[in-house]
Amino acid sequence: MASTPTPYPPSWDREGLEALGFEGFVSFGEVRIPRHLVMPNERGIYAVIRPGSQARAFTAETRAKGGAYDLDDLASRWVDASPIVYIGKADPVGGIHKRVKQFGRRGNSHTGGRSIWQLADADELLVAWLPTGEETGRAVEKRWIERFVETFGKRPFANIDD
């Protein structure tokens, strides 16, 4: 029996994610506190969003694995119309818990999404997650990014091919 694919959010913002059952919406500071937060150890996806409406600002420095991007490159990838700046995947070994913790350590052992750490307000970003049942996190991430591109004409800011 085939499982039902994880649906797309009705809108590409916090409200749309909440409507699908995303949980968390916590800062990376909260994620980094040991045993502070219970996250599932199952496969799924997670999204990183900017909670405010202030103008975006980039920094030239980063502590992320892989180094800093050029500021013009960052600006060219920005998507004004959605607060979602990254969509990530988590598959079985350690699941959502492991992937989000890795990401929260500023890219240590996690090169995907490293542009996040060049946002001046990176510590204020929120991460939320959704288990995907039988569907792999990778499959959902790929479909969601494709739909995001159909909607906005480009990938989420930090979802680039590294």
Image: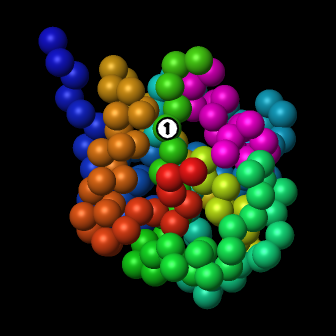
Residue 132 in magenta stretch: no
Amino acid carrying mark 1 in the image: Lys
* Start-end of magenta stretch: 94-111
Does 65 sit left or right of 115 as displayed?
right
Q: Which of 70 and 86 is in front in this view?
A: 70
Q: Is residue 122 visible?
A: no
Count of labels shown? 1
Residue 58 % position (x, y): 71, 78
Q: How is the rendered protein coloured?
A: rainbow
Disc 1 crowd, CA 10 A, few/some/many (<14, 14-19, 20+):
many
In the image, residue 100 lies in the stretch drawn in magenta: yes
* Between 118 and 9, the one nearer to me in the picture: 118
SS at badge 1: strand
- Residue 100 image point, x, y percent: 65, 39
Residue shown at 24%/64% (left/top)? 150
Is 136 displayed left or right of 10 in the figure?
A: right
Query: Which residue lies most toward the top here?
Result: 1
Q: In the rendered image, which quarter contains the N terminus?
A: top left
Picture residue at 83% right of the left edge, 70% below the top = 61
Q: Residue furthest left?
A: 1
> Can you give x and y, in whole percent of width and height, for residue 140 in the image?
35, 38
- Quarter where residue 136 is shown: top left
The residue closer to the viewer here, 70 or 6, is: 70
Q: Mark 1 points at which residue?
A: 89
Q: Quadrant of residue 118?
A: bottom right
Q: Is residue 46 above or below residue 42?
A: below
Can residue 93 be seen here? The reply is yes
Spot occupied by residue 81 in the image (x, y as percentages of width and height): 40, 78
Which residue is at 36% across, 43% downward? 142
